[in-house]
Image (cartoon, rainbow, N blue to C red):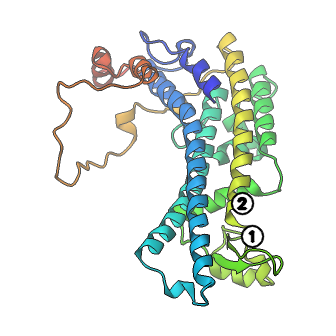
């Protein structure tokens, strides 16, 4: 991901704005917006994978502490759950937060990968609302839908797109079967829907083994609890019978490996397109209108306890961010460009 991001960043034109070899695909204000967003989203994939890893660490640490606490109290012959106080409730909240954060970060990394794939391969879809479904549809969707997403059949552009998308999806075709669909469904449950039934239990493999404490996640998170109970023929059908930490580790390993391979494929595709900019015309559907006309503004200004806004003080950002802001004409020297572009937009 770092290599792909560095390759794309090197193509920024700080004078003209946006990626240098995108000039002429559509009007320059939208090229600047699309270039800036594509570079930003590509650079944040690695951040999301790091975030998922940190949530996994937080989950494991809190679960380890929870297990030790329960072992200590269980050995005293009392019901440990009657002894829980504020520290234990806070630890339980950390476990839940880490679990939700992990799947949110994994899902976001896939959304960012989708946007990067759409941008680099010139797929006809909106960059900002990109999702992994768009990438899979470009491979497995109905012919009519695929024709709308991709270049003309038989063209060199279509050959590049089809080959890259097939190889990307193959990179995600890892064992065990269904892991990616399950992870995306789990993300949707954690963010959008009522959280599913989970089972926390003690067990010993043998009488001599130390007491273990595990968390089992739902087998089919796309179902509601009632649906899962009705459709499952036996209790074993409701849950994954491995500890949640094992499931999270497998998801992150598969996701990181597939994302790394995808970055290599997009790196090659970017170089291919840069050497022949006419191969694929960047679709203007990736950024249909100049930003202020396109997305609703909330008009929210905070809750009233404002810190004095930035005035004459300096704001320091990393050099790469400063370069991106200059290429998007967002610093003081570039602001007159946007005054002209927004008041007198190009036709």
Residue 220 in percent (x, y) is at 71, 69
Using the image as rendered, state which of residue 343 and residue 309 is in the foreground: 309
- The one nearer the camera, 126 or 186, is 186
Place of residue 337 in the rendered image (x, y in percent of width and height, measured from the top left)? 32, 16
User: Foreground: 154 or 78?
Assistant: 78
Q: Is residue 334 left or right of residue 328?
A: left
Residue drawn where x is 70% and y is 45% of the image: 255
Asked if the residue at tag 2 contacts the one at tag 1, i.e. Cβ–Cβ closer than 8 Å, the answer is yes
x%, y% of residue 209?
A: 79, 74
Q: Provide the secondary structure element on which disc 1 rests.
A: loop
Q: Is residue 265 left or right of residue 323?
A: right
Judge the density around disc 1: few (<14), some (14-19), many (≥20) Cα neighbours within 10 Å: some
Is residue 306 something one can see in this rendering?
A: yes
Asked if residue 198 is positioned above or below residue 185 in the image, the reply reads: below
From the image, tell me which residue sits under label 1.
240
Residue at 56% across, 49% down: 54
List x then y, in percent, for residue 38. Answer: 54, 30
Distance in Å between CA atoms under marks 1 and 2? 9 Å
Q: Quadrant of residue 214?
A: bottom right
Secondary structure at badge 2 equals helix
In this orientation, which residue lies closer to the viewer: 42 or 269?
42
Counting the numbered discs, the total is 2
- Relative to 334, say whether 43 is above or below: below
Looking at the rendered structure, which numbered label has been put on residue 320?
Answer: none
Location of residue 264 by image quarter: top right
- Quarter of the image with the N terminus is top right
* Residue 137 in sight from this viewpoint: no
Name the residue that disc number 2 marks. Answer: 247
Picture quadrant where residue 183 is located: bottom right
Q: Residue at x 20, y 25 (%)?
A: 313
């Amino acid at each position: 991901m770092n290599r792909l991001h560095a390759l794309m960043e090197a193509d920024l034109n700080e004078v003209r704005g946006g990626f240098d070899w995108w000039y002429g695909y559509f009007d320059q204000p939208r090229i600047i917006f699309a270039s800036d967003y594509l570079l930003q989203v590509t650079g944040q994939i690695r951040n999301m994978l790091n975030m998922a890893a940190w949530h996994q660490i937080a989950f494991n640490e809190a679960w380890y502490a929870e297990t030790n606490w329960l072992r200590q109290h269980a050995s005293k012959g009392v019901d440990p759950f009657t002894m829980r106080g504020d520290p234990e409730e806070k630890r339980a909240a950390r476990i839940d937060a880490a679990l939700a954060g992990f799947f949110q970060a994994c899902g976001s990394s896939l959304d960012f990968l989708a946007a990067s794939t759409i941008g680099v391969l010139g797929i006809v879809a909106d960059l900002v609302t990109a999702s992994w479904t768009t990438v899979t549809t470009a491979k497995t969707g109905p012919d009519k839908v695929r024709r709308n997403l991709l270049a003309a059949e038989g063209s060199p552009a279509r050959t590049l797109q089809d080959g890259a998308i097939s190889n990307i999806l193959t990179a995600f075709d890892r064992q065990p079967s269904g892991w990616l669909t399950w992870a995306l469904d789990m993300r949707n449950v954690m963010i959008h829907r009522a959280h599913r039934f989970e089972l926390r239990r003690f067990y010993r493999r043998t009488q001599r083994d130390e007491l273990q404490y595990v968390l089992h996640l739902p087998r089919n998170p796309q179902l509601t609890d009632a649906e899962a109970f009705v459709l499952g023929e036996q209790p074993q059908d409701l849950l994954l019978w491995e500890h949640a930490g094992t499931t999270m580790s497998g998801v992150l390993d598969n996701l990181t490996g597939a994302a790394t391979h995808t970055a290599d494929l997009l790196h090659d595709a970017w170089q291919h397109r840069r050497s022949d900019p006419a191969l694929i015309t960047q679709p203007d559907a990736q950024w249909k209108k100049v930003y202020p006309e396109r997305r609703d503004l909330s008009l929210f200004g905070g809750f009233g306890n404002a810190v004095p806004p930035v005035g004459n003080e300096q704001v320091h950002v990393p050099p790469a961010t400063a370069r991106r802001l200059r290429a998007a004409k967002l610093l003081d020297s570039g602001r007159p460009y946007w005054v002209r572009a927004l008041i007198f937009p190009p036709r």
